[in-house]
Image (cartoon, rainbow, N blue to C red):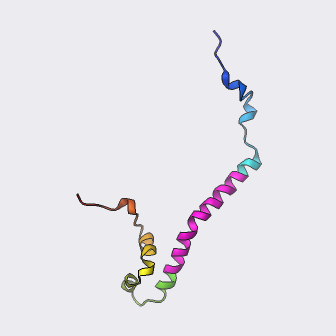
Amino acid sequence: MAKNKTYRKHLPGSSDLVTTYEEVRAGFVALALEKNRRATPFVEQARSLKSAASQVETPADLLIIESIQPALLTASGYREKYRFVPS
């Protein structure tokens, strides 16, 4: 009994599975642009944090500046999803 190879309708040969250099390159470029787009807000936060940090005398003074609180939390590695909520 012969196996039913219905996939042969769409994939007649192994060469149909090969990705061209141009397609691979376009995929990497698209991925890099997306990563850049997602990183932009964090880079802006880091720049504002650096600017504020250069204007204060002690690290404790950074806590007083409300506009950089999100950047401080990001820089410290804090993630909202890891927040401990006591039961």
Quadrant (top left, top right, bottom left, bottom right) of the N terminus: top right
Among all residues in the image, which is located at the extreme left? 87
Q: Quadrant of residue 68?
A: bottom left
Residue at 53% x, 70% y: name it.
42
Q: What residue is at 65 percent from the left and 12 percent from the top?
A: 2
Query: Is residue 84 rendered to the left or right of residue 77?
Result: left
Q: Is residue 34 above or below residue 74?
A: above
Q: Residue at x 44, y 70 (%)?
A: 74
**Residue 75 location, x and y as percent?**
45, 72
Judged left or right of residue 20, residue 4 is: left
- Residue 75 higher or lower than 1, as above or below: below
Image coords of residue 71 (percent x, y): 46, 74
Residue 9 against residue 59 in the figure, above or below: above
Magenta residues? 26-49
Vertical placement of residue 1 versus 72, above or below: above
Q: Main secondary structure of the magenta part?
A: helix
Is 43 within the magenta?
yes
Q: Position of residue 46 (x, y in %)?
A: 52, 75
- Quadrant containing the C terminus is bottom left
Residue most toward the top? Answer: 1
Is residue 18 within the magenta segment? no
Q: Quadrant of residue 76?
A: bottom left
